[in-house]
Amino acid sequence: MTSSAFLTVSELVKRFGEVVAINHVNLEIDPGEFFVLLGPSGCGKTTLLRCIAGLEQPDEGRIVIGDKTVFSSDDDIVLPPGRRNVDMVFQSYALWPHMSTFENIAFGLKLKKMSHAEIKRRVDQVLSDLGMDGLQKRFPFELSGGQQQRVALARLLANQPPVFLMDEPLSNLDARLRLDMRSELKRLHHDAGATTVYVTHDQTEALTMASRVVVMDKGVIQQIAPPEELYATPANLFVAEFIGAPRINLLRAKPFSDATGNRLQVEDFSIPATWLPDREEVIAGVRPENITLHTDEAPDTVQFSVYAVLPAGPEVFVHVVRGDITLVVRMGPGLKLDMDQQVWVDIDASAINYYEVEGGELVAPST
Ligand SMILES: Nc1ncnc2c1ncn2[C@@H]1O[C@H](COP(=O)(O)OP(=O)(O)OP(=O)(O)O)[C@@H](O)[C@H]1O
Ligand SMILES: [Mg+2]
């Protein structure tokens, strides 16, 4: 089996009693990737990371890191964490309580028999990168939660392992610091080029940081794709609804064609379609920014009424209703709208994805 991947997970299964935390997971992570595991609480992100790190023993499958098989149920291989060339930052940061910040970070470097001068240089550098200058002598109990988390991160960065495993490393930081740290981490990753597997349940974090994202639900992979693709072409309704805030608009639609071309019948109105899925009925998904509102009637628009206007700084979210249907529209701040005002909705047909009514899988155009 040859592959250019640096980290390969094959048919991995991990059970906790009745719970299947990881259900036949397959991943191929390229060298230098920033690979993000994303999914709701309890979907198996931490468990998968711990299996890779060697802190949890899977029930079935295989894990290869570099050219080393570190776990294989078939071949009875289970390498301990220390022999896997990985280092992990935990969701709940685990610092040595009796060691100062400096000692916590220097610990792994001393084991590598690095010189004092080099250790000091590296520790000071990572602390400075993470905005923690001057805290070298403090003990964990003298640091805030966010500072402790950054020390844990600094320890990982200073160690420079070939694979970085990070489990929600920014979860304890306030909103502003989290934004700064995202950019800092992205930069550090760019400079160090280490293969990174990063866990988060925050979709914005996933979309901003990742080279590729894997979305999981209940231990099962839903989609693996670069952020843009995940957002524009979700593979199923779970991903479509999980990614994007505000949520994607979903409409039950019946495809048909008439003299004007391809159309979708939705309740009592119809809208143009670029292509027709070969189905009696589908769920049509369209993002809030792919809908435009007009204050006057225009060709191929549908009359709705404004239910609520929610300004959010540079953008405005408008909820519009017609019968049982509510659509969320993302607009710029220019257009002033009143509640109950009549508006004409224009849906960008080229941005619509179709999903199966049963099962919610993406319907691909038949060629
Ligand atoms: N040691 C354990 N014993 C029993 N069940 C466990 C254990 N660890 C995890 N689980 C279960 O396995 C599933 C996956 O848990 P995991 O911690 O991997 O989720 P997660 O995606 O990291 O969630 P979160 O976003 O809340 O951290 C959950 O149903 C959890 O309850
Ligand atoms: Mg977790």
Image: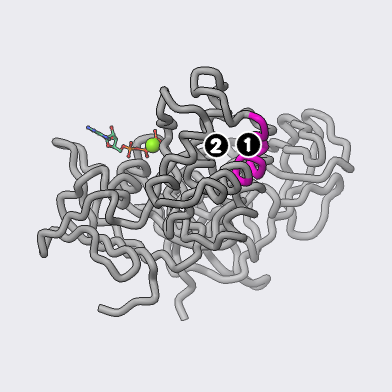
- Check disc 1 and give the amino acid type: Arg
Cβ–Cβ under 8 Å for marks 2 and 1: yes
Which residue position is annotated with label 1? Answer: 178
- Check disc 2 and give the amino acid type: Leu
In depth, the one of 277 and 100 nearer the eye is 100
Give the numbered dot on residue 170: 2
In depth, the one of 360 and 38 nearer the eye is 38
Quadrant of res 3: bottom left
Which residue: 52% across, 46% down? 116
- Ligand 1 shows up in the quarter that is top left
Assign a secondary structure to mark 1.
Answer: helix
From this view, report whether residue 105 is shown above or below residue 301: above
In depth, the one of 295 and 289 nearer the eye is 289
Q: Which residues are magenta?
A: 125-134
* Drawn side of residue 273 relative to residue 54, left or right: right
Quadrant of res 20: top left
Residue 131 lies in the magenta-colored region: yes
Q: Earlier in the sequence, mark 2 or mark 1?
A: 2
Residue 329 lies in the magenta-colored region: no
Dot 1, how many residues are within 10 Å of its Cα: few (below 14), some (14-19), or many (20+)?
Answer: some
Quadrant of res 295: top right
* Residue lying farthest to the top in this orientation: 141
Residue 250 visible in this rendered orientation of the protein:
no
Which residue: 72% across, 44% down? 330
From this view, report whether residue 359 is shown above or below residue 104: below
Q: Position of residue 37 (x, y in %)?
A: 43, 50
